[in-house]
Image: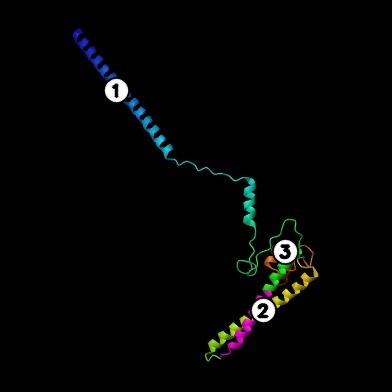
Amino acid sequence: MAATSKKKAKAKKKTSKKKVAKKTKKTAKKAVKKKTAKKVAKKKKKVATKKKPAKKKTTKKPAKKRASAARKRSRPVIKMMGDTIVHGIDPYQAKRGEKYMSTRQLEHFRTILENWRSQLVDDISRTIHSMQDETINHPDPTDRATQETDMSLELRSRDRERKLIKKIDDTFVLIDAGDYGFCENCGVEIGIQRLEARPTATLCIDCKTLDEIRERQVI
C-alpha cells in the first residue's frame, strides 16, 4: 500500500510539473507576441510619419503691402470708348499738389469733348448719306417692314446723339466760364475720374444718385 501511494504521489508531481511547464511556455509565447506587435506598430508609425507631406511655408505679406494690394483691386477701371476714354486720348494723370481744374486739365477735357463731338457728327452724316442711298422699295412686305424698323432705330439713336452734341456744346460754355468740373447743385468737385468716364457730367455722384432715386419714386 505504501508503495502504491508513493507511485501516485510521484505521478501527481510529474503531471503538476508538466502543467507548470506548459503554462510558462504559454506566457513566454504571449510575451514574444506582445513584443513583435509593439515593434510592428512602431514601424507602421514611422512609415506614416515619413509619408506625410511636408507643410508648405506660407510667406505672409506685411500689413502695408496687403492694404495697398486691396486698394489696387478696389480701384475702378474707367473705360468709355475702346482702351482709352476717346480714341487717341489717354486718361489724365494729375501731378502731386496740382490745383483742381487747372489749365492743363481744362485743355485735356476740351480735347476729349472736341474729339467726341467730331465722332458723333461723322456718325450722323454717315447715316444721312446711307439713308439717302437706300431708297429701294422692296416688293416683299416683310423686307419693307424690316427696312422701316432698322431706319427708325437708326434715327432714334441719331436723335440721342444730336442731344448729346447739344450737351457737349453746353459743356464748352461751362469751360469758358470757369464753372466746369463743379456740381451745379452743391458746388462740390465732381472729380477727374468721373469726368473721364462722363465728360459732360454736371452733378457729383451724391447729387446724381439722389436725382436717380427721385426719378424712380416718381415712376
Amino acid bearing label 1: Lys
User: Where, by quadrant of the figure, is residue 104 drawn?
Assistant: bottom right
C-alpha span from label 3 to label 2: 29 Å
Q: Which residues are magenta?
A: 116-136
Residue 121: image tag: 2
Mark 1 — residue?
A: 25
Q: Residues within 10 Å of mark 2 (few under 14, many from 20)?
A: some
Q: Is residue 132 magenta?
A: yes
Q: Nearer the viewer, mark 3 or mark 2?
A: 2
Residue at point 20%, 7% (across, down): 2
Q: Secondary structure at mark 1?
A: helix
- Residue 71 appears left or right of 54: right
Q: Residues within 10 Å of mark 3 (few under 14, many from 20)?
A: some
Q: Are marks 1 and 3 in contact (CB under 8 Å)?
A: no
Percent across and percent down for residue 107 are 73, 68
Residue 205: image tag: 3
Percent across and percent down for residue 106 are 74, 67
Q: Are marks 3 and 2 in contact (CB under 8 Å)?
A: no
Q: Is residue 1 magenta?
A: no
Amino acid bearing label 3: Ile
C-alpha span from label 1 to label 2: 111 Å
Q: Nearer the viewer, mark 1 or mark 3?
A: 3
User: Where, by quadrant of the figure, is residue 28 drawn?
Assistant: top left
Which of 45/73 is in front?
73
